[in-house]
Image (cartoon, rainbow, N blue to C red):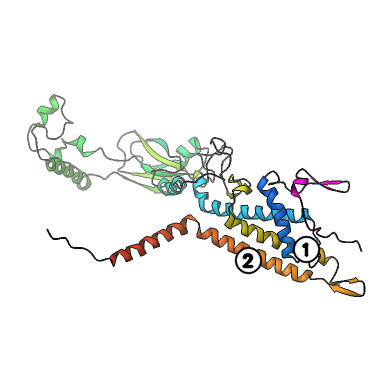
Amino acid sequence: MATAAIWPGSSSFSTYSASYVSGTETIPPTPFGFYDNDTQFQSDSNKVADFVARRLGYPLVDIELQDIDIWSCFEDAITEFSSQLFQGEINENLINLVGVATSSNDWSSLNNQVVTPNLNNIITITKQYGAEAGSGGALDYKKGAIAITSSQQRYNLKTLWADVSESGNRIEVKKVYNEAPPAIVRYFDPYAGTGTGLESLIEAFGFGNYSPGINFLLMPINYDILKMQAIEFNDQIRKSQYSFKMENNTLCIFPIPTYNQTLYFDYIVTKDRGTPVSPEHSGSVNLITNPSNVPYAIINYNTITSPWNKWIFDYTVALAKEQLGYIRGKYGNSIPIPGETTTLNAPDLLTDARTEKDKLITTLQGMLEKLGREKQIEKRANIEDNQQKILNNVPMVIYVK
């Protein structure tokens, strides 16, 4: 059985800042080198290595780890902290970031940026409801027209319009412009006369559409409203009301046309409603579209403050303990030594390491959640409520002049 390398008692990261030489093999000091050039990381690496070794029992027992093993765990712990931190930021800010183009901004990452909450994507979502009413959204409202023939009441829009103008795609009619002229332009309707007896005189001078009042006297506004209502009620009762009905693809219009004309309508192509790609961003590049491409970079270790360093150190110990457990597990439960055998604790190390890792992750996530925007606003509201309760108990002074 090969002799396991043990912790020599000290390390010097700066000696191997470029590479770690083991025999003829050149090995980087950490697997990814995320923080190798950070002077604070270089300084803390040696302290963390000593801290981990002592937590694992050195110098009372041999530790089958080398400095590069502990440095690797240290790098992994910082990266895990960075990942948990930025996952919380992404979870909180993704709705404010989706659709933002990173290439056109003066920042390459969001690490040191303050993300301002905005309503852009919320409004984009709500616009889809307005799209059905023609007041917004991504649906493209189009206008169509068909020729109305005298005495023909029913018209197949699929044949007359969809097959011709939309390549056979199904359309959905949103509005049909089969409406009576406004009452104001029919002020001289014979069934709702003005009562002034001057219709023919004013029409002769071309003032037929003037309002209010054909005698050009200042009249109350209700005078004009009553006249227009009289005209509209006359149409509803004495005339065929303007209306329409859709039956599958067929448009049935009322009243039956008495002369040839052009009828206009608004419509959408139904397949456009299900288009998943936002037309505002179609074809764009370097957009934030999902949590995986939110531009957070590897954290700068030298910016991490003391309260969080403690978590990183403890997580490094848990990772090193797990790694040591795997190493000792390779040799079985016991190994012979002169005169007796010694029992290895690989199962205990692995169990403890996994428990500690889970506990540390849960603790960190809980802390980050408490520090999130939602919890902070809730906490601030509670503080203000409690302050108000305290102030309500302060006696009020009555001033008498």
Q: Residues within 10 Å of mark 1 (few under 14, many from 20)?
A: many
Q: Position of residue 141 (x, y in %)?
A: 43, 40
Name the mark nearer the viewer: 1 or 2.
Answer: 1
Q: Quadrant of the N terminus?
A: bottom right
Q: Position of residue 206 (x, y in %)?
A: 16, 25
Distance in Å between CA atoms under marks 1 and 2: 19 Å
Q: Can residue 369 be seen here?
A: yes
Q: Quadrant of residue 306?
A: bottom right
Q: What amino acid type is highlighted by mark number 2? A: Lys
Q: What amino acid type is highlighted by mark number 1? A: Leu
Query: Helix or strand or loop: what does disc 2 sit on?
Result: helix
The residue under label 2 is 359
Query: Helix or strand or loop: what does disc 1 sit on?
Result: helix
Q: Can residue 299 be seen here?
A: no
At a point 77% along the width and 43% down the height, the residue shown is: 18
Q: Is residue 208 left or right of residue 45?
A: left
Give 96 or 313, whichever is nearer the viewer.
313
Q: Is residue 245 left or right of residue 96?
A: left
Give 218 or 185, whichever is nearer the viewer.
218
The numbered mark at residue 238 is: none
The residue under label 1 is 324
Marks 1 and 2 in Cβ contact (< 8 Å) = no
- Asked if residue 325 lies in the magenta stretch, the reply is no
- Asked if residue 4 lies in the magenta stretch, the reply is yes
Give 79 or 16, whichever is nearer the viewer.
16
User: Mark 2 or mark 1, which is nearer the start of the sequence?
Assistant: 1
Residues rendered magenta in the picture:
1-30
Give 235 or 297, whichever is nearer the viewer.
297
Q: Is residue 224 left or right of residue 167?
A: left
